[in-house]
Image: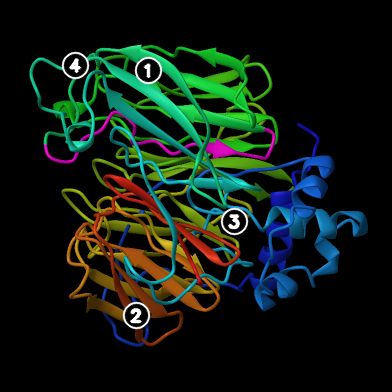
Amino acid sequence: MTARPLFWILALAILAATSSGVLVHGTSKDTGESTGTRSHKAGLLSTDPATAASAAALPISAPSAPSAASALSAPSAFPAASASQAAAHLRWWGQWRGPLATGVSPTANPPVEWSESKNVRWKVEVPGRGSGSPVVWGDKVFLTSAVPVGASGKASHAPLGGHTPRPPHEFKVFAFDRRTGKIAWERVAHTQVPHEQSHQDNGTWASQSALTDGEHVIAYFESFGIYVYDVNGTLVWKKDLGDKGMRNEFGEGSTPALFGNTIVIVWDHITGPSFIVALDKRNGNELWRTSRDEIDTWATPLVVPVDGRHQVVVPAMNKVRAYDLETGKVVWEAPGTTMNAIPSPVAGHGMAFLMSGFRGNNLKAIRLSGAKGDLAGTPAIVWEINRDTPYVPSPLLYDDILYFLKTNNGLLSAFHAPTGKPHYQLQRLDKVPNVFSSPVGAAGRVYLAGREGTTLVFKHGPTFEVLAENVLNDGFDASPALVEGEIFLRGYEFLYCIAAS
């Protein structure tokens, strides 16, 4: 694993430009109050120079983005020949938490306002049910879905997690034309009667998001297999890792991480051995596998550069851990977050931020450089809070502000990430009272899609200011994707492309 993917060429520059000094662990000096919180799914992407150059040549206008220019202005982190390639890579949304795995696009400038009659470029019905987020590369939007055999229309979108008997499902992969919304190709990856139910009210057997690096499209359905296609829909390889058994049969939903030629999958459950495994993206060969003493984990692992190597950071109930990307060996571990670790970690300012909020609350900010062994009670845990953290939604790390919700409610907090000092806490979001999707950011704005169909747009910064409340005739559990002047929203029934008319 000697290649340096373009993602981290840029990410190293951003980390170098924004890293902070020594921080204080524990209580806030300003308020004297104990600080405490939590996160959702993330994976990292890379591409080779030929793919980046090809993507950059696409005839789709790209609005200027000062933040991208700023990121590229840290020359010490870049080989000179790679800056243009890194800039091309930042245009796309190849995994569900965006090109930086933080929820931010440094190049997008999407609309602020829309409705069913304003700034909707296209709207298409997606067969079946899924809560995976759309991913976008070049002229295609990729999406997965579980489609009950014999059902159509609204019946195909209904939650069937507790339905008896369970019907067979087609596990489908779709590629939509980004300009028109027409299906460029679709594939039935697998057909099967699900071996166990999913959540009765919210469940789908396609909760995972696809990933793409502009060469491959990775469709991961956990117990129902992993399927890797080229961008034209030709199957490259597939693999079956077995069947998961989830506590209370709440359903699966962990998206892998993709870094260079390595796919990293966390396989935590209650009915068999839990493990983390690395596969070769090119052929599916297993590179390493490490056992884990954990039950259900839904968070996506996060790959970060640390002290000249790369680590895979994984939250969980018993322990949060970092594994060496090349070997799978544990580098460090710390006390776990909470049961049902769903939010995915984010990283910046030399730290990883891990959180969750089911049957408890916890957020840890862990300094990565020099972290080894058991970190409990050490200064490596820079700050920590134990209240008001998210259950399902992942955090957004935008510049030096860490945004997160309380449980699945429209109660928003914003913290200064390097120090753990709050800018504001439990800001009530009246128009988005129930949230499963994760916030995303671009062009100085934050976008948050709610389950009732409203997407709130507010100003990025230390004070809260609503810019727009946009209502569509669908509800949203999947997180938005931001590319150039567009937002892609996957609802219970429809996929929307939002763009200025």
Q: Residue at x 89, y 56 (%)?
A: 79
Q: Which residues are magenta?
A: 201-215
The dot on residue 100 is 3
- Left or right of residue 125: residue 166: left
The crowd level at tag 3 (other Cα within 10 Å; few <14, some 14-19, many 20+) is: many
Q: Nearer the viewer, mark 1 or mark 3?
A: 1
- Residue type at mark 3 is Leu
Which residue position is annotated with label 4?
Answer: 167
Residue annotated with mark 2: 468
* Residue that mark 1 sits on: 224
Distance in Å between CA atoms under marks 2 and 3: 25 Å
- Who comes first in sequence, dot 2 or dot 3? 3
Q: Secondary structure at mark 1?
A: helix
> Can see residue 372?
no
Estimate the spatial distance between the alpha carbons at disc 2 and disc 1, rounded to whole Å: 40 Å
Separation of disc 3 and disc 4 at Cα?
38 Å
